[in-house]
Image (tube, rainbow, N blue to C red):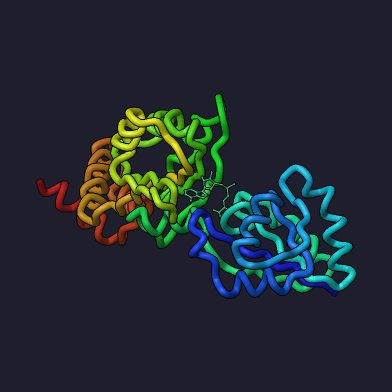
Amino acid sequence: MGKLILVATPIGNLDDISTRQTAALQEADLVAAEDTRHSGLLLQHMGLKKPLLSYFQHNEEKREGRLLAELEAGRTVALISDAGTPGICDPGSAILRAAVQAGHATDAIPGPCALIQALILSGLPTERFAFEGFLPRGQALLPFLQSLRQEQRTLIFYEAPHRLQNTLQTMRQAFEPERPMAVCRELTKKFQEINRGTLAEMAELWQQRTPKGEFVLVLGGAPAEQPQAAEDIRQNARQHLERLLAGGMKHKAAAREVAALYQLPVGEVYQMGLELKQN
Ligand code: SAM
């Protein structure tokens, strides 16, 4: 049986290459890569010389058989993408599933991932988040964003520079403009830049500039609904009860109905009714 290893590579800073990444690529008999020329340069930088096989989004299915045959022959195949973690908006997950199904050993060597880098730098809540990858284009963008309006988790998106301005303007229509946001550009690179502010401020800022480089957008989630304060609940229950009694409903029946609706003890609501009658 062979072994498939998904190996993360830098997202812009070659100093992020780790000892384990180097060892895994060293161990591999074959390296499957999105762009063999680009990855050839990376391997050269790492002092490695390995047979490379192109494996990218549009030949994934075609190449699967070849990679499985290599694994079948007992070889170790390392898979890298152009940048970052394979399988995250990059090829990797389909071949991993196929390798698991065929009973081969699998492993992944961790490393940079733009969404995690952006999230931790954003200053927004990191406890729960939803990664939405690349956004749909054209007419589909606004309804897609609107479908996320109620999402309370921090939202993360990848975006291309030439679509950034339109995306920010459309986000402004879909979400509350005062939501907190971070626009993260050229992460780990020389010109890394993190702009933090409200969605409206970010849309305004990037309207004034020509977006260049790579971007990750991090947007605050919908505010959590505040549980209704206990006193508000009693006040609403009292008013409801008053209406029922004024409408002629029997005291006991009205107390039961209001207690069930507002999840209060029947005795307490009955007492409310007595006080209302006294006043
Ligand atoms: N597999 C990669 C990862 O682990 O993040 C993502 C690959 S995806 C094809 C490329 C997108 O990731 C870019 O369009 C950009 O949104 C984001 N990205 C990648 N590198 C980045 C960087 N250095 N700074 C900001 N965004 C980056």
| Left or right of residue 272: residue 194 | right
Considering only vertical position in the picture, is 146 above or below 240? Answer: above
Residue at point 58%, 54% (across, down): 83
| Left or right of residue 242: residue 41 | right
| Left or right of residue 166: residue 233 | left
Residue 57 in percent (x, y) is at 72, 45
Picture quarter with the N terminus: bottom right
Residue 18 in percent (x, y) is at 54, 70
Residue at far top of view = 139
Residue 187 in percent (x, y) is at 44, 52
Residue at far left of view = 279
Residue at point 61%, 49% (across, down): 89
Residue at point 53%, 46% (across, down): 132
Instruction: Answer yes or no: is residue 263 visible.
Output: yes
Which residue is more in the foreground, 213 or 14?
14
The quarter of the displayed image where residue 263 is located:
bottom left
Residue 170 in percent (x, y) is at 43, 29
